[in-house]
Image (cartoon, grey):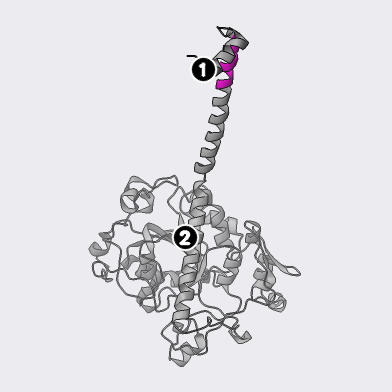
């Protein structure tokens, strides 16, 4: 028997439904499939389209919260109801730097420049406190504007100190009401920075200082960097320049360089090594940095040799005075003679000299130190490389290191050469 529904449809449409009705049903079914398909797809996308960065952000937030909760739990279990709050230091500790206490070092018997070394073993007096920023401290300007203009309240140079300084300082810096502007064309000894940098490049046989990078000079250590103008110029040439200077309570060279956005740190190697591994720099620069290089049997030059990469350069500019007449060459001769003696012992070559600037090049031959007949500087023991605030040692290091790669063998591009990739890896 036919069902009642089919009987009713037969009465309405007859024994056979018209073709138009069938087409209408077919189109309706397709429309329903499209609607339900899109809605299910949207609902699926809403579930699975959570962005990956948001997942990691949430995970990091939860991890940080878990660390805070764990610390609070430890505080409760230890019986202390609240964390100990640190107060602000007094004004007398405004210039405090950890491990640099000249007064305490003098009391402990250090002298002849050793009182300026970093000495954490000297007993520290006073309680823990937060060092205050300068009274009128402001956030430095963004690079590159901050390279040439800094806030005068951020550093320890007052207007009276500026006015009483020499003509070179007034030429380098322009002191305004609350800012100090550095002349980009000036800033080093007698000539402008750009002229001085170009002179060094020409002494190395290059056409201009823009070719220093292609010549293998990528990293520079600037000892006693003054106002940081030389380093600022080298940074503009894509050379990584690090300023290092001795501790100063006021008018700090390091503080000036940091305010200008330049890499800088306190360092003094009167008795201790600088805190860098062997073979770290392509060039070491000293312009009237105050170091007597032929003192202590040339041990300061041995420390520079440790820092320099094979084929690296030591640039020394020392315009102590300019006597008249023939005494000029005599004075230079007297200064250069002991340096020549020590540099020959450590296999350095004087490759250029112009006016008051001298450039030595470290040997690229590791066997030179053992085969040199004039060499009375021994090689350090195998595997010795402990540069972090250890005592200066009168021996040559780095010759057996796998990082003994002459800078002239580098690729002229910013990519590492095949030899460097074997040492440092691809990642």
Most frequent secondary structure within the magenta stretch: helix
Q: Confirm whether the magenta stretch covers residue 156.
A: no
- Say few, some or many: other residues with alpha carbon within 10 Å of mark 2 (under 14 / 14 to 19 / 20 or more): many
33 or 378, which is in the foreground? Answer: 33
Give percent across and percent down for residue 134.
65, 76
Which comes before the other along the chain, label 1 or label 2?
Answer: 1
Tag 1–tag 2 contact (CB < 8 Å)? no
Q: Is residue 285 above or below residue 10?
A: below
Image disc number at residue 25: none
Range shown magenta: 20-29
Who's the residue at 48% across and 51% down the image? Answer: 212
- In what element is the residue under mark 2? strand
Image disc number at residue 220: 2
Q: Which residue is mark 1?
A: 3
Q: Is residue 117 above or below residue 256?
A: below
Give percent across and percent down for residue 334.
44, 73
Left or right, 309 with respect to 76, comes to left
Kindly report the distance in space between the C-alpha atoms of the residues bearing marks 1 and 2. Answer: 97 Å
Name the quadrant containing residue 259: bottom right
Q: Confirm whether the magenta stretch covers residue 27.
A: yes
- In what element is the residue under mark 1? loop
Q: Is residue 377 above or below residue 39?
A: below
Q: Is residue 334 visible?
A: yes
Name the quadrant containing residue 110: bottom left
141 or 352, which is in the foreground? Answer: 141
């Amino acid at each position: 028997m036919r069902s009642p529904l089919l009987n009713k449809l037969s009465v309405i449409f007859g024994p056979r439904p018209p073709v138009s009705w069938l087409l209408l049903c077919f189109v309706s079914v397709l429309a329903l499939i499209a609607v339900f398909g899109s809605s299910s797809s949207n609902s699926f996308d809403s579930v699975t389209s959570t962005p990956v960065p948001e997942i990691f952000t949430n995970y990091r937030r939860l991890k940080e919260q878990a660390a805070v909760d764990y610390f609070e739990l430890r505080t409760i279990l230890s019986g202390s109801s609240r964390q100990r709050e640190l107060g602000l230091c007094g004004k007398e500790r405004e210039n405090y730097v950890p491990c640099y206490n000249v007064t305490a070092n003098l009391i402990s018997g250090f002298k002849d420049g050793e009182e300026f070394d970093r000495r954490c073993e000297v007993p520290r007096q006073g309680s823990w406190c937060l060092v205050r920023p300068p009274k009128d401290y402001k956030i430095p300007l963004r690079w590159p504007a901050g390279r040439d203009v800094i806030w005068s309240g951020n550093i320890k140079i007052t207007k009276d100190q500026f006015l009483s300084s020499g003509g070179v300082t007034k030429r380098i810096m322009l002191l305004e009401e609350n800012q100090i502007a550095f002349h980009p064309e000036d800033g080093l000894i007698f000539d402008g920075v750009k002229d001085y940098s170009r002179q060094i490049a020409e002494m190395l046989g290059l056409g201009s200082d823009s070719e220093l990078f292609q010549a293998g000079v990528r990293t520079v250590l600037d000892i006693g960097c003054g106002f940081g103008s030389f380093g600022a110029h080298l940074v503009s040439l894509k050379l990584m320049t690090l300023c290092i200077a001795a501790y100063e309570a006021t008018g700090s060279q390091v503080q000036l360089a940091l305010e200008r956005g330049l890499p800088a740190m306190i360092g003094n190697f009167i008795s201790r090594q600088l805190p860098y591994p062997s073979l770290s720099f392509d060039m070491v620069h000293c312009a009237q940095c105050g170091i007597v290089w032929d003192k202590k049997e040339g041990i300061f030059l041995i420390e520079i040799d440790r820092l320099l990469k094979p084929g690296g350069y030591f640039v020394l500019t020392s315009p102590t005075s300019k006597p008249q007449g023939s005494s000029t060459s005599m004075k230079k001769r007297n200064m250069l003679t002991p340096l020549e003696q020590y540099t020959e012992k450590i296999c350095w070559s004087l490759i250029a000299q112009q006016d008051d600037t001298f450039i030595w090049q470290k040997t690229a031959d590791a066997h030179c130190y053992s085969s040199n007949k004039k060499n009375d500087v021994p090689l350090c023991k195998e595997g010795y490389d402990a540069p972090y605030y250890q005592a200066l040692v009168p021996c040559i290091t780095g010759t057996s290191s796998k990082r003994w790669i002459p800078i002239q063998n580098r690729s002229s591009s910013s990519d590492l050469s095949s030899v460097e990739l074997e040492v440092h890896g691809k990642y």
